[in-house]
Image (cartoon, coloured by chain):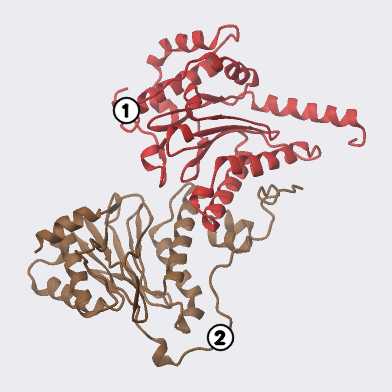
Amino acid sequence: MIEEPYRWLEAIANRREYIEDQLQAALPLAVVNGEPGIIIATKRVGTPKIYEIYDHLAMGCIGHPADMEKIRQSAIELAHLEGFTRSREDVSARRIVTYSLAVGLKNAFEQIFSAPFLFRCLFVELGEKLEKDEGWIVDYDGSYWTSFGRDMSKGLLISGKKEIMEKFRTERESLGLLEFKSINEMVLYAIKLILWASETASLKSSLTEGVRSVEERMEVTTLADYEIVLMDRNYYDRQSFTVGNDALLGFSSSS
Amino acid sequence: MNQNPHLRFSWPVEAGREERLKGDFVSLLKESGILFPFSAPAELPTKPTSERLWVESTTILAFYYKEGVIVAGDRRATAGNLVIHERAEKVISIDRNTILAIAGTPATAFEIARVLQHSFEFYRRSQLQPLSVAAKVRMVSKLLKDNMALSLQGIGIVVPLLALADPFGKEEPTIYFYDALGAQFQTVDFAASGSGSPAVRSILQYINRWSGKPSIERNEEEAIRLALQLLDIAAESDTATGGVNRRNRIYPQVKLLKKSGVVEIAQERLAELFAEAG
């Protein structure tokens, strides 16, 4: 089959269609940065979706739990080996994503006789300053897209629905830079993006209109519905991954 | 199936892989060809016993106070009679709930500390739960045992103290001390190690038995002051202990371990407290 180029292309197309179909139901996950650090948020479901990889690295993902687990373990091993043999400063999202995750995922995707990875992730690196933050969207086929520094304040989003991700990516360019000073503002914006991505019925309305319209629905949502992690810039040189609670995120316990 | 050596997608059949899925960082190091533990070639000449059993040149101590455990150590590093460094860091935060104080050969001690730091974090991140206190205590013991060859030759001996808080905040912090071969002992009042430790032991025994105010009844400031005084006295009789060097503003390292975790005490605060102590 693979000797015939057309059949190989067809097999790859079928594979892509199958994976996209399997990921359709996945809930969106958003990343927003600001002065206090980086917020990673998604709707809370049974299994956690946001993982600590290293002191300043984290990964939020969607897909099959077993696949997420394999990739999570690999990333943790890579980061710790590098941190041990070299130093913490040598452990970077760029090196892990471009030299290992992406290569491995592409290889696995093109092995058409084995089961593919049902996986999509947002790999995040907290910088010492906001300008040094990095966000990498890595897909099941090894392709990646990245945003750095202040640009990340517009938000990064992954979803099971590719068309929503594409719409967001296109329209976010028209958003001005949002310079968040507080954790609370960052969390609210991340939740708006999640609501927009999970509840938007029509792809016709613009991102700006959509985000505005979900503000009404913010009142009925509570923090307990979300899994939220703060990469705290105060702890940049140590373990920055902090699981959010009401007090930390700047909300009163009644909100 | 996969050519990338870093992403081992053929999980879980590879040799050694199952161990790592239990969060074992040392197995990962060994499998990756990174040498640990240290092992000395058998043909290395050993020194006569009388020369081998020299005491580690330093002073480290840990004792209980009102709110938890205090760990302190001087900053001097020596090579024989030579002072080679006055700002050595012998009290090391391994993670948010663990402090290791080291006496002995720095090369081995720092490597043990580095392995512990990565192992504890690796376990916590990969298993999504922190390593238990008992497992941490045993892991230090295992690393010391693995270092037996160098210890017996008198060139890689390490005798550490370990202070641990329960990662779930339920139990009170505890102190363990070790011998060079890895035997572990939990102490009920204090522990000290290194060449200056006899003076520290005597004073703490006196304080706890006869002073009327044992260390466990002392508050944070009193405990820090006591730790500084103990190291200052240890330095009086032990040339390998740096003590408090006010002229060059070199103060010992002092860390507190409370139920909530490790608290580092800044040099400025140590200077103030030591000055108040007279």
Question: Picture coordinates of residue B12 (x, y %)?
Answer: 66, 52
Toward the viewer: A43 or B55?
B55
Question: Picture coordinates of residue A238 (x, y %)?
Answer: 40, 47
Residue density around tag 1, few if under 14, some if 14–19, many if 20 or more, within 10 Å = some
What residue is at 67 percent from the left and 39 percent from the top? A102
Q: Is residue A174 above or below residue A31?
A: above
Q: Which residue is mark 1?
A: A250
Q: Which chain is red?
A: A
Q: Is residue A208 left or right of residue A187?
A: right
Q: Which residue is mark 2?
A: B44
In which quadrant is the C terminus of chain A drawn? top left
Marks 1 and 2, how far apart at CA: 61 Å
Camera sees residue B139: no
Q: Which chain is brown?
A: B
Q: Residue furthest front?
A: B247
Secondary structure beneath disc 1? loop
Secondary structure beneath disc 2? loop
Chain letter belonging to callout 2: B
Toward the viewer: A180 or A108?
A180
Q: Is residue A249 above or below residue A206?
A: below
Q: Amino acid at mark 2?
A: Leu
Q: Is residue A26 left or right of residue A178?
A: right
Say which of marks 1 and 2 sits in front: 2
Q: Is residue A149 above or below residue B172?
A: above
**Quarter assignment of residue B256:** bottom left
Chain letter belonging to callout 1: A
Toward the viewer: A82 or B174?
A82
Question: Picture coordinates of residue B73 (x, y %)?
Answer: 28, 66
What residue is at 78 percent from the left and 37 percent from the top? A110
Question: Picture coordinates of residue A84 (x, y %)?
Answer: 52, 57
Q: Which mark is residue B148?
A: none
